[in-house]
Structure formats: C-alpha cells, structure tokens
Image (cartoon, helix red, strand yellow):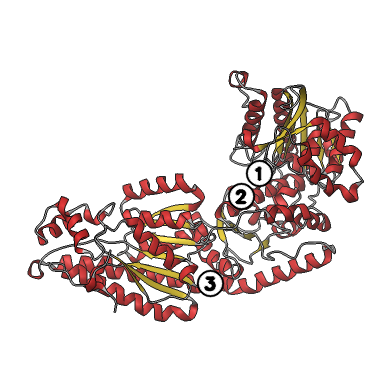
Amino acid sequence: MADAAPARLLDLWDDAKAAGMTEPERLVYRSNILGSDKRVTNYGGGNTSSKIVQKDPLTGEEVEVLWVKGSGGDSASIKLDGFATLYMDKLRALKGLYRGVDHEDEMVGYLPHATFNLNPRAASIDTPLHAYVPHAYVDHMHPDAIIAIAASKDSKALTREIFGDEIGWLPWKKPGFELGLWLGKFCEEHPGAKGVVLESHGLFTWGDTPKDCYEQTIATINKAIAWFEQKTAGKATFGGEAVAPLGAAERRAIAARLMPAIRGLIGKDSLKLGHFDDSAAVLEFVSSKNLRPLAALGTSCPDHFLRTKIRPLVVEFDPAKPDIDAVVAGLADATAAYRADYAGYYERCRHPDSPAMRDANAVVYLVPGVGMLTFAKDKATARISGEFYVNAINVMRGASAVSEYRGLPEQEAFDIEYWLLEEAKLQRMPKPKSLAGHIALVTGGAGGIGRATARRLLGEGACVVLADYDEAALAAADEELGKAYGRDFVRPVKIDVTKEDQVIHAFAEAAVEFGGIDILVSNAGLASSAPIEETSLALWNKNIDVLTTGYFLVSREAFKLFRVQKTGGNVVFIASKNALAASPNAAAYCTAKAAELHLARCLALEGAEAQIRVNTVNPDAVLRGSKIWAGEWLEQRASTYKTDKEGLEEMYRQRSLLKRSVFPEDIAEAVYFLASDMSAKSTGNIINVDAGNAQAFTR
C-alpha cells in the first residue's frame, strides 16, 4: 500500500521492556509503538484502552477501571497523563440512562461522573466504544490498508474475503454511544472474532493481554497489506499517469510562487501557515488520470475528513506548459469558486442548531505534476493535514484498485464537521498568541540580537526563518530554537545579504517552507573603525554593501511577497545610535547606518498604501552576545575611547543618561512591539534603545 516503507509492519513489542512495567505503563508502551508508524494511525488518530483492576481510593476495594486515550491525545507521544480513567461499573450503568440515538450526544455529559481517582483528563467520544467491548485490551486504529477496505463499495464482502470469521464488519455509524452498543452486541454475537472493520472508519481489535492485542492489530493490518499486494500487482494506479511530474527544483520553485498567492487569498481574516509535500505518493496521485474524479469524492475516515475538509481544491496547472503567471492570475477565481461551493454544502446540510459556517477556504491544494499544498492556522496543523491527505491517497489507491472508492456521504461528513460536540471542543481551544500565523525572516539571525529577536517572536507564536552567513552559528541557533519552540516553527537558511541571488533564494525558502512572509527583521551587520585617512575603499564598500545594499535587497524581496499576499507586512530595521549621532573614527559605519535610516523612511512612504509598515530600532553598545564585538571592532572602539576591553562596557554604561547596560533582549522587545499590532498605527518611526543618548534624540 505505502511507498518507501517496508512492505510489512514490524512487530516492535519487546518482552523484556514490557516485563518491568505496570499495566498502565504497558498501555502507554502499546500506544506509542502503534502510533510510531503512520500506516497504523496518523497524528491524533485512533485510541487504545486497558481495563485494569485497581484499588478504589475511597473504599479500598478492588474495582475495574477503564484506561482509555483521552480527548485530543496522540498515540505516538502519549504518556500516562494522556489517558482518562473511568469506573467500569458506572460506565455500564450509563446504558440505563440512554434515551436512544437521537439523544446520544447527551451521554458525553455523564462521562465525568464516572471518573476514577479525580483524573482531570477529559474522556473522548470514543470511550463507550472501548467500554462495551467485553475484552480487557482494545485497539482502535486507522490503518491505510484497512480504511481502503472500509471505504470500498464492496467493503463488507472484501472484509469477509480477506479475514473470514476472524474479523467482522459493521456499517457506517458516527462515533458515539450508539456505536459503542453496536460493538458490544457484535462481540456477544461473535465470541470468536478478534476484531471488526468499521465501514468508512477504521479497525477495532482486541486481546487477552496487551501483547496479544498489539500483535492482533499488527497481524490484521499486515494481512490486509499482503492481500492488496496480491490483488494490485501489475495494475496501473489511479488510472495511470496523465502528466509527467516536474523535476524537484522546479516543483519547489513553483510551490514558492503559488503559496504566497494562495495564502494571501485565504488569509484576509486570519493568517494561515503553509506546508508543501511532493513525496512519491503525492506525485503519483496529482499526476494521475483519476486525480479530479477521486479528489471530488473527498475523504472517508472521519479523522481524515476533519483535518482536510470536504474536498481539496485542484489547481489548474499544466506541467507540460508551465505558465505560472497565468495560474497565479486564476487563483482568485478558483478560491472564490471553492468558497461558494463550500457555502452551498453548508446550506444543503445544515440543521437548525448547527454552528455558524466556519472558514470556507480549502485546506488541501493539489497541483498536477508539482505536489500538494496545505494551509492551516499553524505550521504543525498544516503539516499534519497534509499527512492525513497522504493517508487518504493511500486509501483511494487501494480501494479504487480492487473495488470502487467511496468518500463519506455529504450529510454524514457535515454532521461530523459541524457536530455540536466538535464545536464545543473548538470553543475550549486556548486563545492564539499575538503572532500566531505570522512568518518572520530575521537576517543576522544567529547573532546576539538576531537570536534574541527570534526567541521573542517565537515566544509569541510566530514562525521564524533564521538567515545568517555563519554556518556554524546558524546551525547552533537552529538547534537551540528548534528544540525550545518545536521544529515546525524554525527554519535556517544560509545567506549573504550582499548577494542578490542568495537573498532571493532565502525568501523563496520562506515561501515554500511556511507560505510567505509577514515580518522582516533586517539585522545583518558588521562594524569597522578607522580614521578617515586610514579608511580604505574596500572597507568603505564593505560597510555600504552589508549595511545599506543588504538592507535594500532584503527589503525589496519582502515587499514583493507582501504585495503578492496583499495582507500588509512589517519591516523592522536594526540600525544604530550612529545613524543619528556621529562617532569619531567610524565614518564608513556611521554613513551606512544613516543610509539605512533614510531607506526605512522611503520604504515607509512606499508601503503605507498597502499596509506595509517600516520602522527602525536604534541600539547602542549591545556588547553581550553580539558578533560584531567579537573581533577588531571591540579593540578599535576601546582604543578610540582610551580604555581596555573590560572597561568598554562600563564606559558605555556611564556615558548613557540612564547609566544602564543594553542587552540583546532589550532590542528584541522593541522589535516585537514594532512587529505586532501594538504598534499598528506606527510607521516611519524610530525607537532608540540606547539607555539614553542626547545626540541621538530624534527631536
């Protein structure tokens, strides 16, 4: 079924490791190894449970407790605190309160009353599905190979053909209390069965020990994989190839052009983050003859659907005649048509008590011969949505090869997407951070000010492209910040800001990795000190190249992306006190910094009509962590002011009006203010962060 991975799932159970664990720990272990392979279940998908006898903290008696993955957990990374714990006798008692399928949602409100040991983890909607299966250990997974069967027209017959009496079959039913009762009844009527395929949904398996349960899950999936291999050997997939995929570099370049344009069209009300996938499975699908008819059917498994919306948008692109300008020009009409179609779906399917229509834009964009673009409120969600659609591709490949693929019926899909319980979950989500959905590119990102700035923006939810010419420092900064804030938030790019091609490449990388750019922090710098008669032309040009031309180049590319996106933008220059106040023996540096300041003013004028704000931070004497103070500049400034290295910071502190040192974090705070909505009505402004210098007063 899946490409690149081994043909069969590996049995990862380690008896020696499991032997020293408690029953709850073995549940965590089972969950983690199941979730470690995306062919078993994707991020956040599926759930596991164990019915464990424990001592009641109130009565001291032995009671049966259901440990089941809590709401919102992820099998691959879940820990003990990710599981809900509930008294089984109370869960069984809920059957007496059940008023029928029209009232099943109210049963969720009773689950907290069954909580064991005051566990704060909320129980999920799937709790009854595990509770009423009369086996101690239960796995519910969403394997590609099984969903390919479950989403086929002949789902029931195929299940019988592959598994005989060992694995049963149940028709589609939305997850909830009623489906839990169905599963319990199935087990009573088929005591010899070891699992059941749920139509358009997934797989339930069980066992008498944690190991038995795990191995039954793996064996069932592997049996399906083997059957598909036999049935599909030599067959063309998706009807065969319709277009030839472009080369990797060209695919990436096209994605870099398309993503900011799409991001702008769908991000007017709320900024989105993008993800690009041109893996083999995706390329096979988007280059196939059956791309459009299959894409129109949408996904089947509820977990797939909730992440990927009713259906993707297929971008009209011909890789044999790649007119990318024409494609970009047509995106406005294509996205508008998708929104209109989605609104129609909402109106056809809505109920009197349905929540208001949510964002009508597509999540998944399929580009023939190029790949898949996905957009969401954050990078992780965009990436995970893409992973879910890859699962859907694998499902469509299998189902259409042996039968006829069927997506989830429109009304059923709507009833899950706009489920009141799902809406309640969305309403409980924490408020996004102030820069959530924003993308920042920070030049000089590996230095003291650059790294502090990146850290401040990341802390407010922004994604950051670290741009720097120092490869070793860049790698260290990327490692540090990626570990602290998550790999989905940070990308490094090597750049010399004086090289036009490298600057263009850096912004293309921002576009293809995250979708575009919202904030430019132009911070790359150097410093030199020499009397004018000792200032060589090379030294003069080096200052102008880095501190003026470099700032021009990165600003120009940022403006290009801002204008494509049409959602405004922010540029923050890191200039210097020397942009306003002259210093002895630093004519090249001071002149270049003054040019920066005037460039910022010019850009503020040009960008205002497009809501592009341009502001400047003027630091002074930021010695700690700054790379420009690590070399000759420090010695030169110490010589100019007749002091030594150790005395220079104290000299600067005493020279300031406030008698305080200035640190990288102080500059970062000013950058955040100018990059955020706190300064939404400011452009062309200067913030001096220099502890007070009368010569640098702007008025």
In the displayed structure, 688 sits above or below 307; it is below
When asked about the image quadrant of residue 596, the answer is bottom left
Q: Badge 1 is on which residue?
A: 44
Q: Position of residue 572 (x, y in %)?
A: 38, 68
In the image, 318: left or right of 555?
right
Compared to 162, does 282 lie above or below?
below
In the displayed structure image, the side of residue 658 where residue 1 appears, left or right: right
- Nearer to us of marks 3 and 2 is 3
Sequence-earlier tag: 2 or 1: 1
Q: Helix, strand or loop at disc 3?
A: loop
User: From this viewpoint, is residue 589 visible?
Assistant: yes
Left-right relation of 656 to 571: left
Q: Could you tell me which quadrant the N terminus lies in?
A: top right
Q: Are the residues at dot 3 and dot 2 in contact (C-beta closer than 8 Å)?
A: no
Mark 3: few/some/many CA within 10 Å (<14, 14-19, 20+): many
- Disc 2: which residue: 384
Residue at disc 1, secondary structure: loop
Q: Answer yes or no: do the residues labelled 2 and 1 have beta carbons within 8 Å?
A: yes
Q: Do the numbered discs 3 and 1 sit on residues whose CB atoms are within 8 Å? A: no
Q: Residue at x 22, y 66 (%)?
A: 543
Residue at which label 3 appears: 567
Which three-letter amino acid code belongs to the residue tagged 2? Ile
87 or 462: nearer the viewer: 87
Select label 2 or label 1 by which is in front. Answer: 1
Please identify the quadrant where the C terminus is shown.
Answer: bottom left
- Place residue 329 in its image quadrant: bottom right
Please tell me which residue is depicted at 51% across the width and 72% down the height of the picture: 564
Q: Find residue 138 and report its horizontal and vertical position in percent.
A: 75, 31
In the displayed orientation, state which residue is furthest to the front.
58
